[in-house]
Image: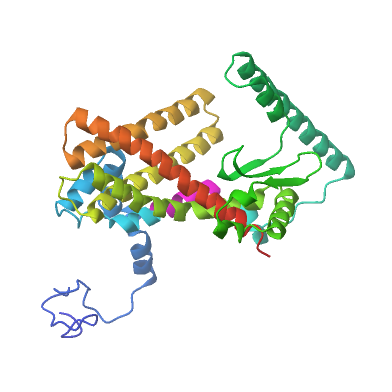
Amino acid sequence: MPDHPNCLNCGTELRGQYCGTCGQRARGRLISLWELLQDAFGDLFEMDSRLWRTLIPLLIRPGRLTLDYLEGRRARYMPPFRMYLVLSVIFFVIAFFNPADDLSLLFEAPPEPTPEEVLAKKEETAAKREAAEVEVNEVLADLAEEGLIDAEDAAALENEGPNITIYGDDEDGFNFKIDPETGECTFSGTEDMPDWLQRRLTKERLERICEKIDADDGKTLINLMLDNIPIALIVLMPVMALVLKGLYPLSRRYFVEHLLFFVHFHSFFFLILTLQILFARFAALVHLPEAIKVLTIVAAGFYIPVYLYKAMRRVYAQGHFVTIAKYVVLSIVYSIGAGMTMLGALLFAFVSVSAP
């Protein structure tokens, strides 16, 4: 029998070891360390847990989780948004977490390089840069010879440094360039930007941005952009849910149901990329042939669009021809939306670089 007549969590009268209202177990003693660890990692090691019952269909049965959730079969799976957050955090940790940088306090500082080593490193870097420039110039020359780009454009692109287009295009918009030899920054097109953007990208701020990008070869800019990508993807999901609502006006589904579709699709996207990264690192560790690693990348590249199509077929239950037409429209809009949100992430990162 329980230690107390009423549930300690919600106050409901108890009729057994578990509360019939909130489900909490009826016991007053403190939990043990082992029970605390079970609560933390139980879903990971129990084969029948909600974690595995969610991840397996998410990976191999497109649209199954969304359809089950909409039809009321929910208790067996992890909540959708919790799953999305967990998988996105796992992906970004595995993809971009570097213990040597992020936990540098735990590692001893490497010994100072000798002057000979510094000189050798500079020569190696210069040789790699020169080889890369030669390779790029050869590609540009081949494209010009085949008539795919203008010869003058190819000549102008040779040996250029970083070129960032924030607004508009290369000819009519804001361009930010850094000379690879002198480190000098040039920017143009600020007068064509919207007023709200001009007030934020002042000349003084652009000069500070230039100094910081040149100081660390853009590493800070890249890190800030990576930090903004999760927010950009969260912004993208409701936009794409509106597109789905427009593509299926007679489905009688609410906006949040279309949003659920993209929550599950993005969760799958994070999962497949995480598995691909882990396999690539395992392949490098055991020295698998390079062809196997390339094959897995190609397979994942084909599987992702096929997964989206089959998920649309299962959830919205329309014919192949209609689904293909809507799939093409959705893919085009998704590409544009993803490009715009990534541009927004770059813009926020670009402005944040100037922060003290």
> Does the magenta-highlighted stretch encompass residue 191?
no
Depth check: give the residue in front, 45 or 232.
232
Q: Quadrant of the C terminus?
A: bottom right
Looking at the image, the residue that sits furthest to the right is 115
Position of 20 with respect to 241 (left or right) is left
Q: Quadrant of residue 256?
A: bottom left
Q: Position of residue 31 (x, y in %)?
A: 33, 75
User: Is residue 274 something that shows in the picture?
Assistant: no
Residue that appears at 34% across and 68% down: 35
Looking at the image, the residue that sits furthest to the top is 146
Residue that appears at 23% across and 33% down: 323
Q: Position of residue 228 (x, y in %)?
A: 51, 54
Depth check: give the residue in front, 299 or 170.
170
Magenta span of residues:
87-96
Depth check: give the residue in front, 214 or 40.
214
Looking at the image, the residue that sits furthest to the bottom is 5
The image's colour scheme reads rainbow
Residue that appears at 63% across and 21% down: 150
